[in-house]
Amino acid sequence: MTSVCLYFQVHQPFRLRWFWPTESENYHGKLEDLYFDTGLNEFTLNKVASKCYHRANELILNSVDYFKGDKRKFKLSYSLSGTFLDQCERWDKDLLDEFKQMADSGCVEFLSETYYHSLSSLFEDRTEFCEQVSLHRQAMKDLLGVKSDVFRNTELLYHDGIAQEVEGMGFKAIVTEGVERILDGWRSPNHVYKRKGGKLKVLLRNYKLSDDIGYRFGAKGWSEHPLTAEKYSSWLSQTPGDTVNIFMDYETFGEHQWEDTGIFWFLGSLPGEVLKWDNLEFATPSEVVKKYESVGDISVPYYETVSWADLERDASAWLGNHMQQLNFTKIKSMESLVKKSGNPEYLRLYRYLLTGDHFYYMCTKSLADGDVHKYFSHHGNPFDAGLNYMAIISDFKERLINNLRRKKKVKVSPKNAE
């Protein structure tokens, strides 16, 4: 019997406001209000919650309840970023309650990730990465009462060093993209693998079947349009392998694919259509790695880092141009200053600035990938996004240095103050 492993990523960043350096002069209010667009963030969460989250959650909970007495239950998994959880606690606590109902059902698994949906796994020193993972684990325990042995890194970023770190933190499995270059041509993403040199299991996203829903569902020019749950489940039933891993953004439902495409009808119908096939069952990532033995090793050197973004499926969506690399180097170098300050608010804001979305908005790619980046960005263009980010982190760094000088906790050299 083939397992259908369904996973949704739920994330909202704290978006930056348009910052002008002169605004910082004699400013004594909350730094979050100086750097981040609170009004836009609240508006966006409420908009997406109305269009996507509440409606999709209702359909998922109904399907879980409908099949709970059957031998083959409807099961799935989520990963909720810490920034999303923060926004829910501020502006939509009912949304958190819905996910708590899922956790209580016993049919929904919640994966671990970096709390701030950050690029910290790409630091040479992964102390910050490990701290963010620990924060996320604690938040999931406190808010939903769950603990997971499966890890999902930001945007499925993966290389051997990340995998080794994740295994060292006690995780039993990690999910990433099933891109051909790590499969040696003959292997399929529809099996369980393990990291080379370790025991960590690796689950690979079947990107074709995932993107049939996430990207192509509403495309009227697509040869398979309209995609029905009946048709899709038949494809799953004919897919060889142990597990078919269907991973996508939760915002697919109602936000990226609008309601008039029939996406909610598809979501509500899919569990029943899948379970009509005797050779299919739903399984969570933990169940998949427990049920199936690995069929081989996965090895990904850091210079071939994998992600689920863009055609390249590498780190270029965030670090593909000089502007992104410069900003990344600058923010990365500020870690020691932030932590030496001993100021919890500075640390929280620093981590919000590490969220990968800020770098995603700076991407200068063209064609279809460029259109996707523009769709998500609230900035006029990637150059505005890059300049605005640089202005904010420069102001933030100046405040950090001045704070440290006043408190005389560390001696800051002119070189470090540049």
Image (spheres, rainbow, N blue to C red):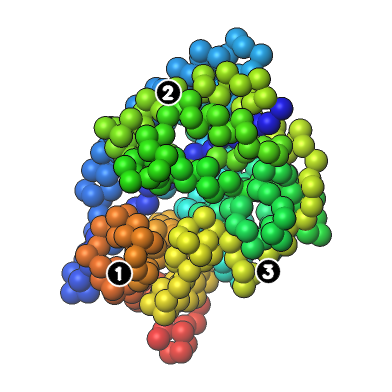
Q: Is 387 located above or below residue 155 in the figure?
A: below
- Which numbered mark, 3 or 2, is in the foreground of this view? 2
Residue 385: in sight, yes or no?
yes
Eyeballing the image, is 274 above or below 246? above
Residue at x-position 46% and y-position 89%: 415
Element type where label 2 sits in the image: helix
Circle 1: element type: helix
For mark 1, what is the residue?
382
Which residue does the image show at 22% across and 74% down from the upper left? 21
Q: Amino acid at mark 2?
A: Gly
Residue drawn where x is 79% and y is 47% of the image? 295
Indicate the position of residue 92 as horizontal and vertical percent values.
32, 33
Of 79 and 300, nearer the camera is 300
- Which residue does the numbered mark 2 point to in the structure image? 268
> Callout 1, which amino acid?
Pro
Query: Relative to 254, does residue 75 appear above or below in the rendering?
Result: above
Residue 75, percent from left and from top: 58, 26
Q: Which mark is residue 301?
A: 3
